[in-house]
Image: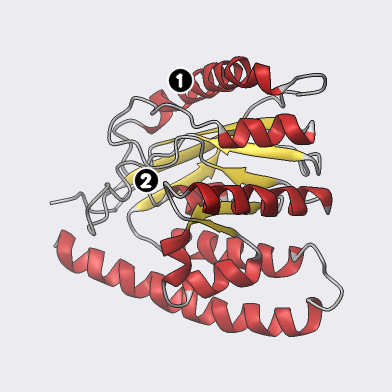
C-alpha cells in the first residue's frame, strides 16, 4: 500500500509542478521586464511547492510561532536540513528569498527549470570555483534587496545530529554586513527519508528565530557567528521536536 500511495504522490507532485511551470512561464512573460528581483516568479515557484505538499496524503506541514511578514533585504537565512521535503515546508514562509541549491537539481526537468526562472542559485558541491561564483550571485541578489536562503550543513543529515556548518553562508553575511536569520525544521526526515523514494507520514514544522547582526564583525568572527547560529537552531529545533515526533496525520497511511 505504501508503494502504491508513494507512486501516486510522486504523480501528484509531478502534475502540480507541470501546471505550475506553465503558470510561472506566463507570469515571467509579463513581469520579468520590470521585476528585477524576480519576486513574482519566485513566489509562484514557492507556492507550487506549498500546493504539492498540501495535496500529499502523508504530510501535515505548518509554521510554529510568530513569523514576520518580511525580513530585512540584506539577510542570509539559514536552516538545518533534514530531507528533500524541507523546501516544501520552508516555502510556506511569507517572504521571497533566493535559494542556494545543488547544481544537479537544476537539471531535473520542470522543477529545475522553475528554479532557474525563479532566480535560485546553483552550486557544484566540492567545486571551489563554483562555490565562489555562487557566493557572487548571492551578493548580487542581496544588493538588489533580496534575501538568500542557504543550508549551512551542505547536505541532509542522516540522523538527528546537525552536521558541521560550512563557512560559506557566514562569510557571505560578514562580507555583506548582513543579518543572519536562523530557521529550524523538524519532522521532515520521516516525510521523505534520505536515499528512499517512499513517503512516510510526517508532521513537519518550521519556526523562525531572531536575526543576528554581523555589523562590525570581520572574517575572524566566522567561527563565533557559526556557533551563535548553531546554538539558536538547536534551541529552536528543541521546541519543535515534541510537536513533531510520532505525529501521524489523521487518516494518512503509515510507511510499510
The answer to whether marks 1 and 2 mark residues whose Cβ atoms lie closer than 8 Å is: no
Residue 75 place in picture, x, y as percent? 74, 38
Label 1 sits on residue: 238
User: With 54 as the anchor, is 248 left or right in this view?
Assistant: left
Residue 201 relative to residue 207: left or right: left
**Colour treatment of the image:** secondary structure
Q: Is residue 157 visible?
A: yes
Q: How many numbered callouts?
A: 2
Is 230 placed above or below 203 here? above
Q: Secondary structure at mark 2?
A: loop
Give the residue at mark 2. 83
Label at residue 29? none
At 83% from the left edge and 54% from the top edge, which residue is drawn?
144
Say which residue appears at 72% left-offset and 79% top-offset: 27
Label 1, residues with CA under 10 Å away: few <14, some 14-19, many ≥20: some
56 vs 34: above or below: above
**Residue 11 in which image quadrant:** bottom left
Q: Residues within 10 Å of mark 2 (few under 14, many from 20)?
A: many
**Label 1 vs label 2, nearer the camera:** 2
Mark closer to the chain start, 1 or 2: 2
Q: Which sits in the foreground, 6 or 225?
A: 225
Q: Position of residue 54 (x, y in %)?
A: 47, 59
| Secondary structure state at the residue bearing disc 1 | helix
The image shows residue 215 at horizontal and vertical percentages of 82, 23
Q: Which residue: 63% across, 72% down?
A: 117
Whether residue 179 is visible to the viewer of this picture, yes or no, is no
Amino acid at each position: 500500500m505504501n508503494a502504491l500511495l508513494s507512486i501516486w504522490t510522486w504523480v501528484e507532485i509531478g502534475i502540480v509542478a507541470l501546471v505550475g511551470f506553465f503558470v510561472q512561464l506566463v507570469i515571467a512573460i509579463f513581469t520579468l521586464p520590470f521585476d528585477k528581483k524576480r519576486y513574482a516568479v519566485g513566489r509562484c515557484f514557492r507556492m507550487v511547492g506549498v500546493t504539492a505538499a498540501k495535496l500529499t496524503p502523508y504530510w501535515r506541514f505548518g509554521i510554529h510561532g510568530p513569523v514576520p511578514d518580511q525580513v530585512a533585504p540584506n539577510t542570509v537565512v539559514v536552516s538545518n536540513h533534514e530531507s528533500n521535503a524541507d523546501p516544501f515546508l520552508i516555502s510556506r514562509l511569507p517572504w521571497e528569498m533566493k535559494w542556494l541549491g545543488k547544481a544537479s537539481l537544476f537539471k531535473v526537468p520542470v522543477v529545475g527549470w522553475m528554479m532557474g526562472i525563479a532566480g535560485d542559485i546553483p552550486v557544484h558541491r566540492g567545486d571551489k570555483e563554483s562555490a565562489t561564483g555562487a557566493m557572487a550571485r548571492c551578493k548580487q541578489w542581496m544588493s538588489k534587496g533580496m534575501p538568500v536562503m542557504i543550508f549551512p550543513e551542505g547536505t541532509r543529515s542522516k540522523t538527528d545530529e546537525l552536521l558541521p556548518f560550512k563557512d560559506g553562508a557566514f562569510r557571505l553575511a560578514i562580507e555583506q554586513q548582513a543579518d543572519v536569520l536562523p530557521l529550524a525544521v523538524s519532522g521532515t526526515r520521516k516525510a521523505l527519508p534520505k536515499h528512499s523514494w517512499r513517503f512516510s507520514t510526517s508532521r513537519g514544522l518550521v519556526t523562525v528565530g531572531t536575526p543576528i547582526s554581523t555589523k562590525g564583525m570581520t572574517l575572524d568572527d566566522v567561527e563565533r557567528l557559526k556557533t551563535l547560529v548553531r546554538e539558536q537552531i538547536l534551541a529552536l529545533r528543541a521546541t519543535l521536536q515534541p510537536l513533531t515526533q510520532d505525529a501521524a496525520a489523521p487518516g494518512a497511511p503509515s510507511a510499510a
